[in-house]
Image (tube, rainbow, N blue to C red):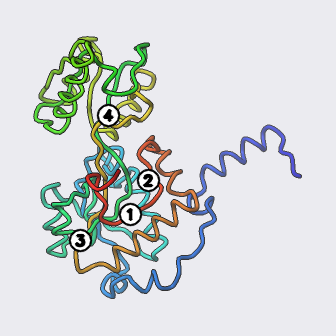
Amino acid sequence: MIQFTKPLRRLAVVLAAALPLSVLAQTRPLPPDVLNAIPADVKARGVLRVGSQQTFPPVEFREPNKPEVTGASADLLAEVARRLNLRLEYIQSEYAGLISGVEANRFDVASGGISDTEEREEKLDFVNYMQSGGSIMVLSANNDKLTTIDDFCGKSIATMLGGRVIMTAVEAASERCTKSGKQPIRAEQLPSAPDSRMQLDLKRVDGYIGDFPALVYMGAQFPGRYKIVGGNYILTPYITSWGFGKNRAGLRDAVQKATQAMVDDGTYKRIMDKWGLGGGALQTISVNLPASKRK
């Protein structure tokens, strides 16, 4: 067995880190039937067109003054495209225009944080690649044993104004508190995420409920200041997905199979962990399986 001296060992680590994830994973080629399912126009173009709002860190976003789209979804799609012998092209789109953009063939994939829901499945098909939802962030200095919303009896939380799904979950938890003889949860709905975070920083609230990926990204901007209760506890789960036209089953299935292959060979987990989103990783890359249909 080869043994490295310390300098060489450090160099080996640096070189390994510089290698593409696909090289480290030693990926196997996809079966011919997967590649043959890609629509002829996409093959001829050699490009997978992705519609994205590009404002959803750390999932899919552009850093200020940089042209590249980055994030967990961007890395996953780049590897999917590589395995399908395609290259990516991003087309900026407002979130509200993602479904209509696919229907009008402006792009092949709706991305950028779109969620699979039963209602949306009437218009698009979805490849589900990540679980997400509302999580609770607290200050790292908080030593209370907080792992779920039910541990916030008698405590206060902040969340964004208009988050009806989150508030319904908080109200239900608060009712459970009072039924068990504890104090209710005090909820403050604030206009924006910075307002909520400020209240947490000032210790005027005990927790801030926000979107799991956004909280992960926020924590990365202020190392050591925050933590998510329960490690990666999700209060109100939903499924983040890529959307495809109803007449694009071949492309949908090719992307699903390529992504599942990444799960099987470990590439998927490495990408998710790289962006701090391992808590939202799925074991199976499904098609049209929203949170409402999951146990």
Closer to the eye: label 3 or 1: 1
Closer to the eye: label 4 or 3: 4
Quarter of the rendering containing residue 256? bottom left
Q: Which residue is mark 4?
A: 135
Pointers 1 and 2 in contact (C-beta within 8 Å): yes
The Cα–Cα distance between marks 4 and 3, rounded to whole angstroms, is 32 Å
Pointers 2 and 3 in contact (C-beta within 8 Å): no
- Is 255 above or below relative to 206? below
Q: Which residue is mark 2?
A: 282
Tell me which residue sits at (86%, 46%) in the image: 3
**Amino acid type, mark 4:** Ser
- N-terminal-most mark, 4 or 3: 3
User: Mark number for residue 173?
Assistant: none
SS type, badge 4: strand
Task: Using the image as rendered, state which of residue 27 and residue 5 is in the foreground.
Answer: 27
- Is 160 above or below relative to 293? above
SS type, badge 2: loop
User: Mark number for residue 286?
Assistant: 1
User: Mark number for residue 107?
Assistant: 3
The Cα–Cα distance between marks 3 and 1, rounded to whole angstroms, is 22 Å
- N-terminal-most mark, 2 or 4: 4
